[in-house]
Structure formats: structure tokens, C-alpha cells
Image: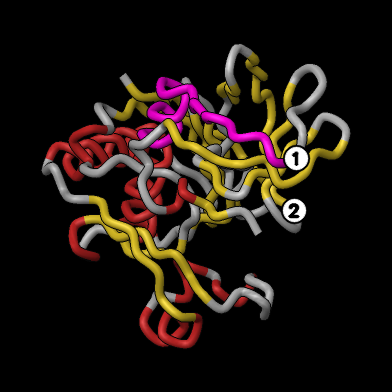
Amino acid sequence: MTDALYLEDSTETEFDATVERAVDDRVVLDRTRFYPTGGGQPHDTGVLRAGDREWRVTDVRKRDTVYHVVDGDPPEPGTAVRGVVDADRRRAHARYHTAQHVLSAVLLAAFDAPTTGNQLYSDRARLDCEHERFTAADLEAIEAAVNDVLDAAHPVEWYTLDRETAERELDPVRTRLDLLPDSVTAVRVVEIGGGDVDRTACAGTHVGNTAAVGTVRVTGRETAGRGEERVRFELD
């Protein structure tokens, strides 16, 4: 199983690893900082280097382990490689993911609207929640409340809890631990403001302080289904 270094530190973007196996255009490493698509967050991109050879990493997927899709013939098993993640893309995703957590917390606190889904990009994001319909005034209030939280420069921290402790301590409305398969025995928790702002299960990458997110601009809303609203936003 690949050691998921991206869960430990979202800011580090380079690492050394060894190729364990290659399947067609997919490479499995013994350790990686490349984030695989999941939780509404897109995969990282970047390169693998070995001597004067270089392979572009165009996709990263997690199945039984983490697979790195590369261009060209993949490196042979046993090859020592240097991985370099696209730092700008990673930071954009981390900023948007932290912003999404704050938005989710604001929607739950102010409108009793739990998040049902989200999709992040490097230049925009959307969030779906349980709510009948937001008015223009609601959207203005949401934007202001989110930016107040971000400007307060709350620390963002992450750590792991065993499944039993997580089920006992975390808010089931926010985390939906019941959706995780029974095989998941350890839960990664992301905490904002010491838990006063948000504390929920998440395997994504984040910035270390809400001030690093920037300013959220709510760009619109639409119906996402019966009793569900979709809120779109961008970061300045």
C-alpha cells in the first residue's frame, strides 16, 4: 500500500520514492505526495524524474492503492524517482477546499443546511446543500459571514482518530461517517479554529490558516434537486 504523504503535509510538493509496479500507463510508488481525485477535489499533476528521464503525471487515482497515470512508457519497478507536484495547482485546490469547509459551516449554522456534495477546481467551486432556495440577500449574508471567518485567521489543523472515537466525538450531520465502509478504521479529521468553526472528517488538502484562503465571492445559486440548492463561488 502506498504511503499517502499528502495526508501529512499539504505544503510539501516534492518527495523521493521507488516504483513498486507499473501497469500500462499507471505507476504505483511506495510513497507519494500526489493527491488522487476524491472528496470533490481534483487530482494533482506534476512530474516523476529519474536521472535524465521525466514522466508527466496527468492523472492520479486511488483504488486498492494510488495509481499515477504518466505519459510515455512508465519507469520500471525498482526505479528510484523524484516526484514534483505542481505547487500552484495544489495550493489552489487547498485554498478552495478550506473555503468550502468554512462555507459548509456557515450554511449549517445560519440556515440549518447540511452539505450534500461539492466540486472544487483551481479557479472556482460549487457546493450542494439541503435548502429550499436562497435569496439574493441570503447569498450576500453568506458571503459576508464566510469572509468574516476567513479574515479572523483561524488555524487549520488535521489529525487522525480511530473510527470508534470519531463516531463518538464528531457531529454526524457534518461528517456522515455512516457512509464510510466498515473497513475504514482510522478517520482523518480537519479542524478549523480549534473546532469552533468546523471539525469534520476529510482526506483533502488544506491551507494552514483561513487567512491564506483569500476572499470568497459567491457568484450564484441554482436548484440542485428537490430541496437542494447549489452555491457557486470563486476566490479573489
Whether residue 26 sits left or right of residue 211 in the image: it is right
Looking at the rendered structure, the secondary structure element under dot 1 is loop
The quadrant the N terminus occupies is bottom right
The residue that appears at 41% across and 34% down in the rendered structure is 96
- Give the quadrant of residue 230: top right
Few, some or many C-alpha atoms within 10 Å of disc 2 (few <14, some 14-19, many ≥20)?
Answer: few
Whether residue 159 sits left or right of residue 153 in the image: it is right
Where's residue 183, x and y in %?
67, 77
Of residues 184 and 41, the one nearer the viewer is: 184
Whether residue 214 sits left or right of residue 77 in the image: it is left
Whether residue 117 sits left or right of residue 95 in the image: it is right
Q: Are marks 2 and 1 in contact (CB under 8 Å)?
A: no
Where's residue 215, x and y in %?
26, 27
Which residue lies under the disc numbered 1?
Answer: 77
Residue 151 visible in image: yes
The residue that appears at 48% across and 22% down in the rendered structure is 86
The quadrant the C terminus occupies is top left
**Magenta region, residue range:** 78-95
Few, some or many C-alpha atoms within 10 Å of disc 1 (few <14, some 14-19, many ≥20)?
Answer: some
Where's residue 206, x and y in %?
36, 43
Of residues 208 and 18, the one nearer the viewer is: 18
> What amino acid is labelled 2 in the image?
Arg
- Give the quadrant of residue 77: top right
Q: What is the spatial separation of the Cα atoms under label 2 and label 1, in whole angstroms?
A: 19 Å
174 over 124 or under it: above or below: below
Of residues 178 and 25, the one nearer the viewer is: 25
- Residue 100 is marked as none
Residue 230 visible in image: no
> What amino acid is labelled 1 in the image?
Pro
Which residue lies under the disc numbered 2?
Answer: 63
Looking at the rendered structure, the secondary structure element under dot 2 is loop
